[in-house]
């Protein structure tokens, strides 16, 4: 039965090119060549029928000689290859068109625009909700929908990109960041234009939902503004090597915290940030940086200067990076406001550490110290926390804050935070 079926299949395969040859009606000049190919085709067909018959007899007899069967199958495969070659030669002799298109003359390269789907920006949304409670005083505003953020990101062309983040906070709509940046400039310089969080230290650049604690460090909030330092202006960035990797950032902006920090004059402020990075081993990384910020209001003879030093040490074994990581970071800030050349310097800073217990849980602790910008009060905080990184879209955190403002008694606060995200933005730390 199998032999009969195989013969019908071979006959059908042979009839198709024969019918095609007849339909093409070759010119007299090629008739002899077609006749010769047809005779060769009949000879190969007879050879294939013989091979198939031998194979059928061997299978019917239940033969288990693998060597003999392999030889017969090889002969059958060789015969089928010959048939394919003959079909191709017959098609060429009859003038049938080849399956491959004819080569076209070279055309000049043209720029093609992106498809409609590529023109759409990447859209993401992030929610950040916190519940807090204290051990003393009146419980008020315990549940805080702190921020809902919608982000738009897109490549405008091969050399320029844009990021826009709209913040929905306490019923108010604002632009947290909205800037375009260019990466293909001479000297490997990156240029940012628009509103952005400024590169003061390390954590000021991060969005609120991406921080290792539920709030920005106390020194950043006290000296740079409740939401940290952000402004509208120009930013230049350049990375270079030589005994490590180094990044230099220079920014000219009108700060969003202009009233508190620079006296509300609306004048430009100037920031310079230098970051140095070294890989100490296969699993250990160190970065040390410094920041300088200048601004003021000549109408009130105010000059403000803020300086900062930062460091971060990270241990992350390559083989177990998903399960183990230890980071220690810290910043020291100095704020000096001078009216007509007279003013005092206030100090503040923090030290924090996070340790990844496994793939899901991260334990952290932070210590904050701040001298009040307006008086002699000193605030200290100790903040342990436990974060569950449920997935790359969901993060849950429990946090306790011990706070002491001299000469007042200590206060205690407990907080639960939930952060979730949709879209490609996720928990990006910038």
Image: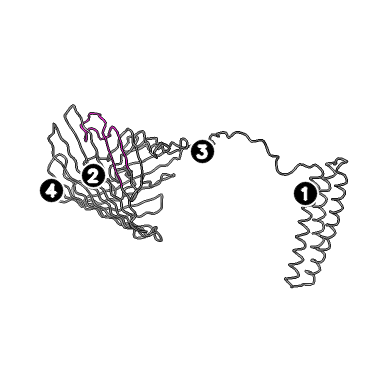
User: What's the CA distance linking mark 3 and mark 1?
Assistant: 43 Å
Residue 251 counted in the magenta span: yes
Residue closest to the far top = 299
Q: Is residue 173 visible?
A: no
**x%, y% of residue 101?**
70, 41
Residue of label 1: 88
Label pair 2/1, CB-CB below 8 angstroms: no
**x%, y% of residue 105?**
66, 35
Task: Give the vertical position of 58 relative to 37 (above or below).
Answer: below
Tell which circle, 2 or 3, labels the residue nearer the N-terminal end: 3
Q: Secondary structure at mark 2?
A: strand
Marks 4, 3: nearer the viewer: 3
Residue of label 3: 118
Marks 4, 2: nearer the viewer: 2
Residue 308, numbered label: 2
**x%, y% of residue 130?**
30, 47
Numbered range of the magenta stretch: 248-275
Residue closest to the far front = 242
């Amino acid at each position: 039965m199998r032999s009969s079926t195989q013969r019908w299949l071979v006959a059908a395969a042979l009839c198709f090119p024969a019918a095609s040859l007849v339909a093409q009606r070759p010119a007299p000049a090629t008739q002899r060549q077609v006749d010769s190919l047809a005779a060769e085709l009949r000879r190969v067909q007879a050879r294939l029928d013989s091979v198939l018959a031998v194979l059928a007899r061997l299978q019917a007899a239940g033969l288990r000689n693998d060597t003999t069967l392999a030889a017969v199958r090889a002969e059958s495969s060789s015969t089928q290859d010959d048939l394919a070659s003959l079909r191709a030669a017959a098609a060429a002799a009859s003038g049938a068109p080849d399956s491959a298109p004819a080569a076209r003359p070279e055309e000049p390269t043209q720029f093609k625009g992106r498809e409609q789907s590529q023109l759409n920006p990447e859209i993401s949304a992030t929610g950040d909700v916190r519940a807090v409670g204290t051990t003393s005083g009146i419980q008020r505003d315990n549940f805080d929908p702190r921020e809902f953020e919608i982000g738009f990101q897109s490549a405008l062309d091969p050399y320029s990109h844009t990021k826009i983040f709209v913040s929905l906070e306490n019923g108010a709509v604002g632009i947290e960041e909205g800037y375009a940046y260019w990466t293909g400039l001479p000297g490997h310089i990156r240029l940012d234009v628009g509103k952005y969080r400024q590169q003061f230290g390390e954590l000021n650049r991060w969005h609120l939902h991406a921080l290792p604690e539920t709030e920005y460090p106390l020194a950043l909030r006290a000296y740079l503004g409740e939401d940290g330092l952000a402004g509208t202006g120009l930013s230049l960035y350049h990375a270079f090597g030589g005994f490590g990797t180094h990044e230099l950032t220079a920014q000219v902006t009108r700060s969003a915290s202009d009233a508190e920090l620079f006296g509300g004059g609306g004048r430009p402020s100037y920031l310079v940030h230098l970051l140095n990075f070294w890989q100490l081993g296969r699993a250990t990384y160190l970065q040390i940086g410094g920041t300088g910020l200048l601004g003021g209001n000549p109408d009130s003879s105010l000059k403000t200067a803020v300086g900062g030093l930062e460091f971060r040490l990270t241990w992350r074994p390559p083989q177990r990076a998903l399960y183990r990581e230890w980071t220690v970071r810290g910043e020291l800030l100095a704020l000096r406001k001078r009216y007509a050349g007279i003013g005092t310097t206030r100090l503040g800073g923090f030290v924090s550490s996070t340790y990844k217990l496994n793939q899901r849980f991260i334990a952290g602790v932070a210590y904050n110290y701040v001298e009040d910008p307006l008086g002699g009060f000193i605030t200290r905080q100790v903040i342990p926390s436990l974060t569950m990184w449920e997935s790359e879209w969901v993060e849950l955190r429990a946090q306790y804050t011990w706070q002491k403002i001299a000469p007042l008694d200590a206060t205690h606060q407990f907080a639960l935070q939930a952060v979730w995200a949709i879209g490609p933005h996720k928990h990006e730390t910038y």
